[in-house]
Image (cartoon, rainbow, N blue to C red):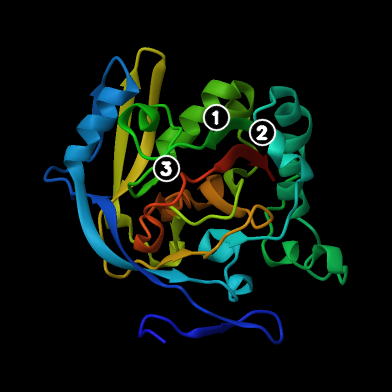
Amino acid sequence: MPKHQKSLTVGKAAKVPAKHVEADLLFWRRPTVDDDVKCQSKNNTESITNEQRTLNDAHRVTVQDIRGQESTFTLDRNGFTYVNHEIAELDQVSNPQCMREIIIPKTEQLVRDMSVDPQSTSTNNSELNRSRTGASRTITFVDRVRCFATDTAQLANNRSPAHSVHSDFSIAGALHQLSTRMPEECRLLTSRVLIINVWRPLKTIQRDPLAVCDWRTMEMKDRITSRIALPSGWTELGRYAFNPRQNWCYLSGQRPNEPLVFTQFDSHRVDEGGFTVPHTAFVDPLYTGFPARESLEIKMFAFV
């Protein structure tokens, strides 16, 4: 067995080799000025994508396969978790009515169900008990299918895997999303608000899997905010510089019934960086010639 592999126990009996991957992840170069906000005013996202590529800083990283150890990673501790959750209608993601009336509601229910009592003995909730959001209300504001190989035009339209380490929002970007989409909620802000991303394969993942960083291994000094101004408005993302302390993880052969649930903001954890978990697609050299990855991501506000 190769040195980078070791056996992981799945369930009580089956053993599979852990498929750790040595991958070049694209980080951002550390800024040379105190103000780390890069404001970009462009007419289209494709020109921004091309410009941002000049800021990439590649580093070889071991992406740890946590297959068989999923239960040791939780939403409140690590910032991400994998759960068992099936949606029979996934083959209808191109149907707007099905997305609106079935797939999105079922995904929102998944996040709300993650607030079940951790003392519950129900076997149906055993997977969900590992990570709790405590959410009583969820409101989806983005749903996106990625189904193209990396291509400049498609990447600009967010239709292909994003091969750069990022979080969907900085703290300011998350609050701006909330104030823009739900101004009354933002004005009051009396309850805890999270932004949750539920990322799900539409077919078993081989090419361009998604890696997430264990939040406990992040340092504040590694964060670089990136503000993008477009005619339609502005958004602010989180970018990250490389740090050897970072622990990157993924789930090998991730299936449609194994969604990744991870935080992109937590209003109660602003002092520690907002819980804006970094993530990125990466190249597994074993699958470079395989068909393009197909995945669905649904982002929502979760009110606690």
The furthest residue to the left: 32
Viewer can see residue 35: no
Q: Amino acid at mark 1?
A: Leu
Residue that appears at 69% across and 58% down = 132
Q: Nearer the viewer, residue 276 or 6?
A: 6
Question: Could you classify mark 1 by the number of other residues whose Cα lies within 10 Å: few (under 14), some (14-19), or many (20 or more)?
Answer: many
| Above or below 210: residue 252 | below
Seen in the image, is 263 located left or right of residue 36? right
Q: Earlier in the sequence, mark 2 or mark 1?
A: 2
Q: Which mark is residue 161?
A: 3
Q: Nearer the viewer, mark 2 or mark 1?
A: 2
Are discs 3 and 2 less than 8 Å apart at CB?
no
Give me the residue at 27% from left, 27% from top. 48
Q: Secondary structure at mark 1?
A: helix
Q: Is residue 91 left or right of residue 23?
A: right
Q: Tell me where residue 45 appears, x and y as whole percent.
A: 33, 24
Note whether 65 is above or below 91 in the view shown.
Answer: below
The vertical placement of 179 against 64, above or below, is above
- Residue 269, given in percent of the width and then of the height, sits at 50, 52
Distance from the alpha carbon under mark 1 to that under mark 3: 25 Å
